[in-house]
Image: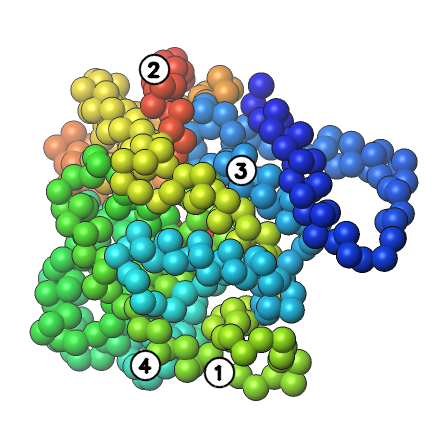
Amino acid sequence: MVLEVGSLPLLQDALAVLEESFQVMPEYTPEAVKPEVSQVLLEAATRMQDNYPYAHPLYAGQMLKPPHPVARLAYMMSLWINPNNHALDGGRASSALEKEAVTEIAAMFGWSEFLGHLCGGGTMANMEALWVAGRLHPGKKIVASKMAHYTHGRISEVLQLEFEAIATDARARMDMEALEAVLKRGEVGTVVVTLGTTGVGSVDPLPRVLELQKQYGFRIHVDSAYGGYFGLVDNLADEARAAYDLLDQVDSIVIDPHKHGLQPYGCGCVLFRDAGVGRFYQHDSPYTYFSSDELHLGEITLECSRAGASAVALWATQRLLPLQKGGEFAQGLGQGREAALRLYQQLKHDQQYLTVMAPELDIVIWAPKGESASEISRLSQQCFDEAEKRHLHLALFELSADVAAEYWDEQVEFDQPTVTCLRSTLMKPEHLQWLPQIKGILDQSMG
Ligand SMILES: *Cc1c(COP(=O)(O)O)cnc(C)c1O
């Protein structure tokens, strides 16, 4: 069994409680659904069969993690209301839950005063952060590392801000000398620091960036869409730990509850340390909602309509699994990281494989041994296909030859600019228990 459905009866109980709130309304009975609904639904389910088994521990490829049952149920329950968190008229209860849930996320970063809200995802969240950055430093550059999410360049384009990519070191972290060289030219308004790059999970050296900030004066935006929750775990290496411990000093942070926070898609979050940036959002729309004097979420977001259900799901998840060090949620994340560390060690000591940087979070990159970059690339693709036939789902990753050479220089001929590697994102706590099966199938897939 891959799909958890045992929790479904809880949905009916929750809907019964929700129904109680409407007892004051005059009797009204919604139309019963037509029999065709069942037919169409089953047809849709059949079409949905064409999917990878994301919820199974042998799915260890891309950044896909099933939502927690409580998130799924709370989301579905609120769909019977379908609240819109743009404004209090559309989502009174869910707006309150959003504020509470976002306050808890901010507290995880050590922030008690802030401005923040949920949004569609990490791209939208980064867009808001860079939009504010541009308003504060008009005409100045945004810089991010070459391993930062590709959307930073594109968002800068949309915002008509100049963007420059900063070189990375052998561990895929922003290179501090390269950053300083760009800072010396004096045109940088904002440095985007990635804690948990999408490709390899590398953590930029935030402590060094903060030191440079004292000298050169720029804004720091942290993109931790993927890695934001890892400050809660107890098994980070010292350098990554130091970066997470300084998050209270940055200017804005992005985190994606729909990546590692057990949420359905459509749940990103942006936080600003200075609540004063709310002034940039001021608008004067003739449709403004007047039911409350309180600053509503639509006055501090770029998006208008968005799913209040996301907020309800997030609130319920954090209620069940508080964002605390040593808590169940933190332990689950820590298990994925432990799985990544063990897999890396096993691969490193196995003659069949070539490894690169040690995982900083829960993502591992490696490749089958080969004589040249082209041969390794071919073998990676072959192993990926063979593993999939055995129901182990991995991912592929194009590593630049410069980085690979730091690790394999003497053994490999670099006859092309990149080398295809295997990549595994061990996001689920179950990955730790399943590691022997994962490694076993991987070995079989090497042929
Ligand atoms: C996933 C990711 C994004 C983009 O977020 P979406 O939710 O997919 O829009 C941005 N930055 C990083 C580091 C990411 O991992």
Query: Which numbered mark, 3 or 1, is in the foreground of this view?
Result: 3
The residue to which callout 4 is attached is: 136
The amino acid marked with disc number 2 is Pro
Give coordinates of residue 150: x percent, y percent: 39, 57
Q: Are marks 2 and 3 in contact (CB under 8 Å)?
A: no
* Residue 360 seen anywhere in this rendered image of the structure: yes
- 443 versus 379 height, above or below: above
Query: Which numbered mark, 4 or 2, is in the foreground of this view?
Result: 4
Spatial distance from mark 3 to mark 1, Cα to Cα? Answer: 35 Å
Q: Is residue 441 left or right of residue 303?
A: left
Spatial distance from mark 4 to mark 3, Cα to Cα? Answer: 40 Å
Residue at 15 percent across and 50 percent down: it is: 242
Quarter of the image for the C terminus: give it.
top left
Q: Which mark is residue 282?
A: 1
The residue to which callout 2 is attached is: 436
Which residue is situated farthest in the front direction here? 24
Question: Based on the displayed image, in which of its 4 quarters is residue 280 positioned?
Answer: bottom left
Query: Which numbered mark, 2 or 3, is in the foreground of this view?
Result: 3
Tag 2, which secondary structure? helix
